[in-house]
Structure formats: structure tokens, C-alpha cells
Amino acid sequence: MKFNEKLCSIRKSRGLSQEELGFELQVSRQTVSKWESGQSYPDFQRLVLLSDYFDMTLDELVRGLDVQDVRDMNRTDERVASLYRDIESGKESVRKAWKAFCIVGGIILVLFAAVVVVGIVSPHVG
């Protein structure tokens, strides 16, 4: 049995909702849901809390855990985090470019206004 299936089974056998278990472990219901669906795994501290809460050894709790699945999930999480960092960096570049565009546009507008005002104020020769 995979860890996520085992966790779900143990939780249900104890009559706990995901929200109740999350409260005991100080995580959200969504986090427990991700653990049970195999989308993520608890960190070591949470594994210890889970084993204590269910009165099991860590070995009993994680036996059968596919370590490669955990490694793959961590790599995926790192890639997603990297993408978010890249997006934030891109947003910052766009903000800087927009600010520069506004400053240059403002300067051009002031210069244009000055040329128009000077053209209206100075007498026409002719």
C-alpha cells in the first residue's frame, strides 16, 4: 500500500476528517488532501507528528513508501517554484520597463508642450 493510501485509510479508520487531522498537525485540510492524493508528501517533522498521533512507528507509517516518488515530487516542486520565480522576475522587468517608458514619454510630452508654447508666444516672421 502506498503512503497516501495508508494515510487515508488510517485517518478514516480513526473517524477523522481531513480538516480534523490537519488541525492536529497544524496544516490545512488542503495539505492533508494533497498528501492523500499523492500530490505531495509531508516533511519529516510532520511524519513524526503523524506517527506520534496515530501511535505508530515511523517505519509502520512509511513502510512501502516509494522513495523515488518522493524524489520526483521534490524535483517537480522545485521546477514549479523556479517557474514562479522566473514569472516574478519577468513581472519586475515589465514594471521597470513601464516606469522607464512613462518617464521618457513624460519628458517628450513636456518638450512637445514647450515647443508648442514657444511657437504660440513668439511672433511669426513673414
Image (cartoon, rainbow, N blue to C red):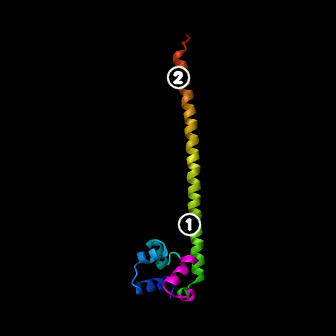
Amino acid under disc 2 = Val
Q: Which residues are magenta?
A: 41-60
**Where residue 75 appears, x then y in whole percent?**
60, 72
The residue nearer to you, when weighing 49 against 95, is 49
Q: Nearer the viewer, mark 2 or mark 1?
A: 1
Q: Quadrant of the C terminus?
A: top right
Q: Give the secondary structure at mark 1.
A: helix
Above or below, 96 relative to 44: above
**Where residue 114 appears, x then y in whole percent?**
55, 24
Q: For the point 48% across and 83% down, which residue is it?
A: 7
Q: For the point 57% across and 88% down, which residue is it?
A: 59
Identify the residue under disc 2: 116
Picture disc at residue 80: 1
Inspect this view and state whether residue 64 appears.
no
What is the magenta segment's predominant secondary structure?
helix
**Where residue 89 appears, x then y in whole percent?**
59, 55
The residue nearer to you, when weighing 48 against 90, is 48
